[in-house]
Image: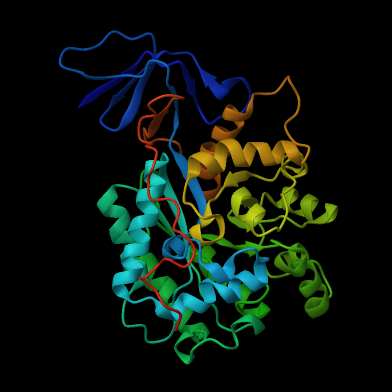
């Protein structure tokens, strides 16, 4: 099967530097792969899409999400809260309210929203697990992704120890056992993980928060098992200054130093947020090739701050983009994450001001696609172009399921 996208106004590659924009104006896709780019002549019986006045860019790669939060938009108790208060008020308060039906519905809504915004690959940091669960959240995430033809990277979250913010949770949400967590990682890798370049299913070792979710000795064992299985590692880190305070108080070191001590740095590791970092932490992340999933809308909504992408990039830290959860950014929209919010926030932080460097769209595509492929260990082989224009954008429509009025959700009640 052959498809030609013709007459594009611009073609973005997701690559850095002069390779950020490709000469077109046409693209030919054959059997799911880009076969040619340039001024092309249509083939007999070839399907054609007229992309006049449109920009073509690679489909977004979302490197950090919480799909279950799709039903928690506009939850009133979580509004105008900082991170810790918001965690207690919204995602932790509602975790026990999810059953198989509502979890599947949340995942489906989140994936459809992402797909409508041009996202084809999703790393879902799912931490809805507890002992003796009556349904399999991992299977639901993979099956819903398969139904939409999306690439799913399951970041298997969870915890083997509790934290103060969770002490009032229902007993049903107590931490897992370490043996149980590790056994489930092996089960998921055996059943779902496909390491091939074009695979649509990957599994990642991803305890919810490295500072709080497991003791140091267990973190080392998790890292060791992940590398034995050939899977990557992911978690939250340094979203607020509280991470720095907690690491110094509990471990007498910075959060990034703690990760280094427990084998949680390397080019097979990426962390969400990394907003509050000391210069020596940025340097250590760069030396080890550890990546970031930058989540600008969520960090802004919770008042966490803006990650210093300029310093991170200059240090050699791979930069990708994540939506985080719809409960903290009120949307699941990679288009707005990459273009207005990600790029404008970076400029507000002092990044990307030089006229000699590519503009915001090219940088957004580089982080939102090329950086995402790097973070997830994917080779750029699939043809996942997406079209967008100021008028009549293909694949995006106004009035989609984005926001819920505060207090109007009847689907969930806190347990």
Residue 23, relative to residue 401: is it above or below? Answer: above
Can residue 2 be spotted in the picture? yes
Quarter where residue 400 is shown:
top left
Measured as percent of width and height from the top left, residue 152 is found at 39, 54
| Image quarter of the C terminus | bottom left
| Residue farthest left in this picture | 45
Residue 356, relative to residue 121: is it above or below? Answer: above
Colour convention: rainbow
For image coordinates 67% across by 49% down, the residue present is: 289
Measured as percent of width and height from the top left, residue 136 is found at 33, 74
| Residue farthest bottom in this picture | 171
Measured as percent of width and height from the top left, residue 364 is found at 58, 35
Q: From the viewer's perspective, is 115 left or right of 319?
A: left
| Image quarter of the N terminus | top left
Q: Nearer the viewer, residue 393 or 240?
A: 393
Can residue 192 be spotted in the picture? no
For image coordinates 45% across by 74% down, the residue present is: 128
For image coordinates 82% across by 78% down, the residue present is: 249
Q: From the viewer's perspective, is 254 left or right of 5?
A: right
Residue 299, relative to residue 317: is it above or below? Answer: below
For image coordinates 76% across by 57% down, the residue present is: 276
Q: From the viewer's perspective, is 408 left or right of 147?
A: right
Q: How many marks?
A: 0
Measured as percent of width and height from the top left, residue 211 is found at 68, 73
Quarter where residue 256 is shown:
bottom right
């Amino acid at each position: 099967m052959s498809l030609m996208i013709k007459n594009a106004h611009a073609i973005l590659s997701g690559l850095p530097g002069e390779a950020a924009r490709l000469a077109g104006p046409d693209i030919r896709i054959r059997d799911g792969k880009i076969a040619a780019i340039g001024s092309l002549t249509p083939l007999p019986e070839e399907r054609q899409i007229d992309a006049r006045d449109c920009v073509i860019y690679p489909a977004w790669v979302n490197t950090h999400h919480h799909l279950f939060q799709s039903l928690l938009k506009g939850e009133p108790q979580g509004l105008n809260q900082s991170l810790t208060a918001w965690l207690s008020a919204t995602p932790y308060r509602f975790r026990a309210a999810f059953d198989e039906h509502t979890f599947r519905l949340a995942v489906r809504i989140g994936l459809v929203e992402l797909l409508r915004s041009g996202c084809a690959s999703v790393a879902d940091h799912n931490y809805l697990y507890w002992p003796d669960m009556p349904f399999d959240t991992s299977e639901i995430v993979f099956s819903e992704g398969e139904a939409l033809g999306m690439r799913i990277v399951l970041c298997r979250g969870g915890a083997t120890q509790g934290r103060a913010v969770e002490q009032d949770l229902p007993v049903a949400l107590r931490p897992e056992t370490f043996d149980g967590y590790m056994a489930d990682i092996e089960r998921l890798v055996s059943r779902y993980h496909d390491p091939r370049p074009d695979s649509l299913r990957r599994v990642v070792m991803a305890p919810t928060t490295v500072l709080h979710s497991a003791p140091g000795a267990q973190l080392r064992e998790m890292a060791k098992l992940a590398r034995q299985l050939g899977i990557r590692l992911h978690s939250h880190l340094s979203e607020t200054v509280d991470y720095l305070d907690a690491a110094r108080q509990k471990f007498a070191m910075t959060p990034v130093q703690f990760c280094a001590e427990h084998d949680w740095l390397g080019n097979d590791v990426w962390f969400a947020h990394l907003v509050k970092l000391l210069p020596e932490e940025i340097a250590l992340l760069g030396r080890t090739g550890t990546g970031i999933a930058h989540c600008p809308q969520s960090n802004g909504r919770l008042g966490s701050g803006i990650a210093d992408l300029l310093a991170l990039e200059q240090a050699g830290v791979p930069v990708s983009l994540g939506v985080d959860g719809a409960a903290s950014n009120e949307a699941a929209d990679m288009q707005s994450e990459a273009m207005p919010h990600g790029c404008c926030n970076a400029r507000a932080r002092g990044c990307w001001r030089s006229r000699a460097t590519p503009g915001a769209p090219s940088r957004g595509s580089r982080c939102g696609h090329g950086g995402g492929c790097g973070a997830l260990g994917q080779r750029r082989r699939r043809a996942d172009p997406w079209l967008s224009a100021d008028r009549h954008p293909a694949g995006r429509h106004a009035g989609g399921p984005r926001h819920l009025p505060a207090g109007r959700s009847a689907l969930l009640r806190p347990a």
